[in-house]
Image: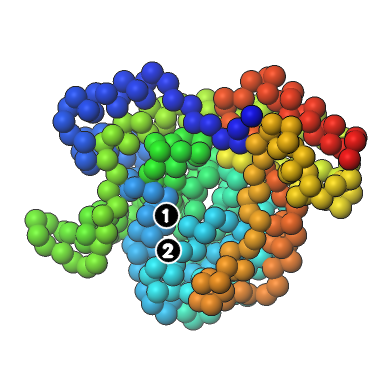
Amino acid sequence: MISIAMPMIGNEEISAVNDVLRSGMLAQGPKVAELEKAFAEYCGTKHALAVNSGTAAIHAALFAAGVQPGDEVITTPFSFIATINPILMLGATPVVVDIDSKTYNIDPQKIEAAITNKTKVILPVHLYGQPCDWSEIQSIADKYGLVAIEDACQAVGATYADKKAGGLGDLACFSLYATKNIMCGEGGMITTNSDEYADAIRRFRQHGMSGPYQYEHIGYNYRLTDLQAAIAVEQLNKADSFNKKRQENAESFNNALASIEGIELPFVEPDRTHVYHQYTIRITDKFPVSRDEFVQAIREKGIGAGVYYPKSLYSIKHIAESGRSAGELLETERACAQVVSLPIHPMLSKEDIDTVITAIKDIARNA
């Protein structure tokens, strides 16, 4: 089976973990501090704060931005559920607007109409590894005095107008989950240039603590361990080479699949770089089989394929009951019915890529 995802773990990561084990400092310590410094430098921000998941990163960033019960947060309905759950965890209301049909990112043209006097934050997602149209989003945020937070969980190393994801918004959130472009099994990062936001996140990730047994507000145990940070430091050193390999793999797929009727390839805006956390195609009505039939056929050929995402977040019961949809979600529903992601990770060999291409052409020819 050619896996949809596979982490690359080298001798550097193994050695770094062994060093931490020998040190006896297994919880948050010097390795976390090293990771935070390196990650801030990589993203071009003043601060980077480590937490134990991408979900925790979003939760902490929303808290730092002052989101409270009764506030509204504008976001996308086409993402992993961790984008919206933290909004609900803070007692706020998620307001979803439709996506752009080409990039799958939130459509900036639909954001302004969703703003009310309760709106506090705009939380766009750099989906699949391509940044949103940030200049338009930031312009709207500035006009209405809103906080703009990047959900960059899938976009480490991606750029918008030559500026890295993580350095675009007031805050940005990353995931270091095992399938991400860089990983440490489980983990998250938050970047910001604000001292105030950074201080709030440091407290929030450690029970609201501001000093020894002094607590300013509710907080959580969201700390990252040095064991995980040791892996992440080494992965960060390889981030650009990992992303380059993903981009090369994507180019191979683009060249081979462009002529197949009924398949729409990933669209990349000219002012940004895509780091292909996922290589996502559309199976349109012009293809001989449906998307679901395509997924079944390619899996039967020993190739992992994933659907990210088969349903809109707004169709999930607890979100629909607690959120608000700003208009019809026609592009979201169309994407849910058509998208499929192919293996794109750096561990793919040329033979693997050729196998995937041959399988797709065979399905197109013989369906």
Residue 55: give its label.
1
Q: Amino acid at mark 2?
A: Pro
Q: Is residue 184 left or right of residue 220?
A: right
Count how many numbered circles sit on residues in the image. Answer: 2
> Camera-side residue: 275 or 221?
221
Q: Where is residue 33? Give x, y as percent.
A: 25, 38
Residue that carries the numbered disc 2 in the rendered image? 86
Rendered view: 185 above or below 314: above
* Image spot of residue 45 (x, y percent): 38, 44
Residue type pointed to by label 1: Thr
Residues at badges 1 and 2 in contact (C-beta under 8 Å)? yes
Res 229 → quadrant: top left
Residue 141 visible, this angle = no
Q: Secondary structure at mark 2?
A: helix
| Residue shown at 23% from the left, 28% from the top | 20
Relative height, residue 91 to residue 167 (above, below): below
Image coordinates of residue 189 in percent, x first then y, are 38, 46
Residue 261 showing in the rendered view: yes
Task: Quote the CA–CA distance across marks 1 and 2.
Answer: 7 Å
Q: Earlier in the sequence, mark 1 or mark 2?
A: 1
Q: Relative to the observer, which residue lies in front, 193 or 13?
A: 13
Question: Residue 21 appears at what percent x and percent y?
Answer: 22, 28
